[in-house]
Amino acid sequence: MTARAERERKPWSLRRRLLAAIVAASTVLWLASLGIVTMIAWIETNEVFDDALEESGQMLMAATTDWQQRGLLARAQEGRGPDRKVDMQYQIVVGGQVVQRTSGAPSQPFVRHFDDSHGFADPEVEQRRWRVFVVRDEERQFEVQVGQRYKKRYDILQELAEHLWLPVAGFLLLLALVCWLLTGRVLKPLRATVSKIAAKSPGDLAQVELAGQPRELLPIVQALNGVLGRLDVALQSERRFTADAAHELRTPLAGLHMHVQLLQRQHPELVAPFQKLRRDITRVTALVDSLLTLARLDPLARAQVATTPVALAPLLEQLLASHAQEATSRNMALSVRCELDIVEADPAMLDILLRNLLDNALRYCPDGSRIEIVAERHAGRPRIGVRDNGPGVDNASRQRLSERFFRVLGQQQAGSGLGLSIVKRIADLHGMTLAFGPGLDGRGLGVTLDFPGACAP
């Protein structure tokens, strides 16, 4: 076995793949977002430092004047609007008095009684908080105090945040989208397993494949396979029992029927009781035959049904001929309207299906009724319908007609309740759609079978 085949056979961890995918995507997007944030911060920082350089230049220019000449250094404000980012203000303080200042600086010193040669302070002047740097000359004759309002610093942070929120939000959305796609890809085997389980029909108890399953899902799949295995054994045992019991009953029932006929000839005075006994035996024999038919159909899957083109007209004519005598004796009108030449089906199963439908109509319709078999195109698909104008079935009972051993209450006719169950099973094996509705003349019962695919002209 190759190394690749060994890796494919070995169960993989869904958690590890999901974690690796999310961490990798988050790392790549985080690095990309960090690069964009750094670039924006670099641009904003350059603007702030450029503004600080300009402010410093203006202050140095102002400092060249005679500091003993009191005055307002308005030149530091020329050409500058209220939108300055740094907005540093300058004071020259001598003996606790401001002798020169910029127009934005207060008339009183930022800081009084500063003892160090230089340093920072956070005074509140005229109800405004300032960040101030103080430097004194060596002879302590004057002080230079440079201040900046804290509000300006907050404005810089706010502007930076306004530039950053959109890229950051965009990357968060991109991260969410990438994680969504990655988790969907990682969880694809899980969805595939769910689809396989959901697609199983009551007759499909095959094991779910373990190859390629994630490690976290293996215990669930193994437990499900155990349940499916036990169900398959139980159903196989039940089907074998039904088939064996029905097969074993056929021989004694046939013998019993012959004995009853013989006794009827020997005792003509007991014709009525023997006739009733023969009808009961016939009914039990039909039940056994139906059980045998279901026992043969139940294990089959749709893929096992070999369909071939079936000429429909000869099949319907043969079906009509085989029931003509019974229909004539009961004054019932049988008619066939065939507009289809060929349908794809298993010939034997299609014959069983149609015979059960016609037998069911003949059994439950009173004498003098009409029964019509129609083969036609409907919405581009083959459709076969069997309709009658008999007593019909109420809407609630129609939903249960294909259930095994279900019989409509109040029926006086003998029956096993398996005929339409056989029809439903054959329809499922062929992919047909079975439906029950009203029959002829707005009454009775109508049974329709829609074949899959397009029909032959």
Image (cartoon, rainbow, N blue to C red):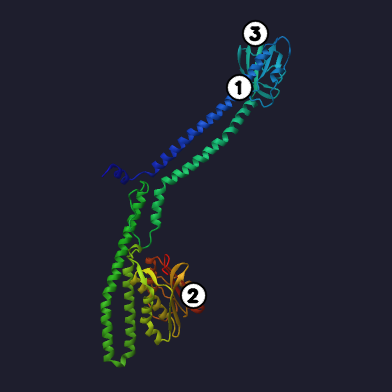
Picture residue at 34% right of the left edge, 83% below the top:
279
**Which badge, 2 or 3, comes first in the chain's sequence?**
3
Determine if residue 272 is in view. yes
Q: Nearer the viewer, mark 2 or mark 3?
A: 2
In-front residue for pair 273/170: 170
Q: What's the residue type where badge 2 is placed?
A: Pro
On the picture, is 300 further left or further right than 91? left
Foreground pick, 257 / 165: 165
Left or right relative to 110: residue 414: left
Q: Which residue is mark 2?
A: 438
| Quarter residue 139 falls in | top right
Q: Picture coordinates of residue 411 (x, y %)?
A: 43, 79
Measured Cα–Cα span from mark 2 to mark 1: 90 Å
Residue topped by disc 1: 50
Is the residue marked by circle 1 packed among few (<14), some (14-19), or many (20+) residues within 10 Å? some
Q: Which residue is mark 3?
A: 140
On the rendered structure, is 144 left or right of 202?
A: right
Q: Tag 2: Cα neighbours inside 10 Å, few (<14), some, or many (≥20)?
A: some
Height in image: 129 above or below 388? above
Question: Where's the N terminus, which quadrant?
Answer: top left
Direction top: furthest residue: 139
